[in-house]
């Protein structure tokens, strides 16, 4: 790994010591963890209330603009740092492993990227997080069922209502038998909510709506960063 990735903390850029991976001990310690996995009815779950039905939701940390942890997500998405996703996923996996409400999860499903975007980036960052999680819980990674339509791209220039309409049709599922009556864990990188950015949870929500077409399915949600503006 040391030959493949630069050995600097993805948050503060300090050199990493031997056992440190992706972020240094200080940044690991200072990370504003949400501990939502221990809190039923937590603020992330609240975001979905009255919109879509979910079982549980948790986030690793509070995502704040201008914080050093914003850099962690940025490097994961734009600097080819798949390793960050896997490592942060492991931190989530450790928490989920010890949490009763997540113990019945059968499948882990990352929010799909637009195929064009994934080709350009070379990977889906949410899938990397899912890989890290899968190392700790007894659930299988599932990337074939939920997909993003090729012909629909999020139109940021459109008005709010149109954008909503558009996101609704972005995700769909392939026919599946194995996911029937299962508990799936939907994995996203960041979930943002707030008075002015209400539309931002649309991608996660649209995925949930698509997955809800599967008979007897139960859905929990997990992300790295939870942002409330
Ligand atoms: Zn650091």
Image (spheres, rainbow, N blue to C red):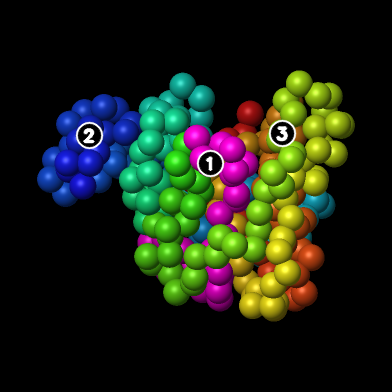
Question: Is ligand 1 closer than 8 angstroms to the Cβ of mark 1?
Answer: no
Q: Which label sits in the foreground, 1 or 3?
A: 1
Q: Where, quadrant-wise, is the C terminus in this rendering?
A: top right
Residue on which disc 3 sits: 154
Q: What element carries label 2?
A: loop
Q: Is residue 211 or residue 143 the one in the foreground? A: 143
Q: Is mark 3 on a helix, strand or loop?
A: loop
**Inter-mark Cα distance, 2 to 3:** 33 Å
Residue on which disc 1 sits: 118
Q: Give the range drawn in magenta.
A: 93-120
Residue 162 falls left or right of residue 174? right
Q: Where is residue 85 in the image (x, y as percent from the top left)?
A: 40, 46
Question: Is ligand 1 closer than 8 angstroms to the Cβ of mark 3?
Answer: no
- Quarter-of-image position of residue 79: top left
Of callouts 1 and 2, which one flags the residue occurring earlier in the amino acid sequence? 2
Q: Is residue 170 or residue 44 the one in the foreground? A: 170
Residue 6's disc is 2
Give the vertical position of 100 relative to 229 (above or below): below
**Inter-mark Cα distance, 1 to 3:** 14 Å
Q: Which label sits in the foreground, 1 or 2?
A: 1
Query: What residue do we see at 67% from left, 48% from top?
Result: 148
């Amino acid at each position: 790994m040391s030959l493949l990735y630069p050995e600097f903390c993805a948050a503060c850029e300090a050199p990493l010591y031997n056992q440190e991976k992706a972020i240094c001990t200080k940044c690991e310690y200072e990370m504003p963890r949400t501990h939502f996995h221990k809190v039923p009815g937590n603020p992330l779950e609240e975001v979905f209330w009255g919109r879509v039905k979910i079982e549980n939701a948790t986030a690793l940390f509070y995502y704040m603009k201008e914080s050093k942890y914003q850099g962690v997500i940025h490097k994961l998405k734009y600097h080819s740092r798949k390793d960050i996703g896997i490592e942060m996923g492991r931190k989530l996996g450790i928490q989920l492993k010890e949490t009763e409400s997540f113990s019945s999860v059968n499948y882990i499903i990352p929010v799909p990227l637009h195929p064009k975007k994934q080709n350009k980036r070379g990977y889906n960052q949410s899938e990397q997080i899912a890989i890290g999680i899968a190392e700790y819980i007894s659930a299988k990674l599932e990337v074939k069922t939920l997909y993003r339509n090729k012909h629909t791209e999020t139109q940021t220039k459109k008005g709010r209502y149109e954008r909503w309409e558009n996101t609704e049709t972005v995700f769909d599922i392939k026919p599946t038998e194995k996911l029937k009556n299962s508990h799936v864990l939907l994995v996203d990188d960041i979930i943002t909510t707030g008075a002015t950015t209400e539309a931002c949870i649309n991608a996660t929500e649209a995925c949930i709506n698509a997955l809800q077409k599967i008979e007897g399915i139960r859905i929990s949600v997990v992300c790295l960063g939870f942002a409330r503006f």
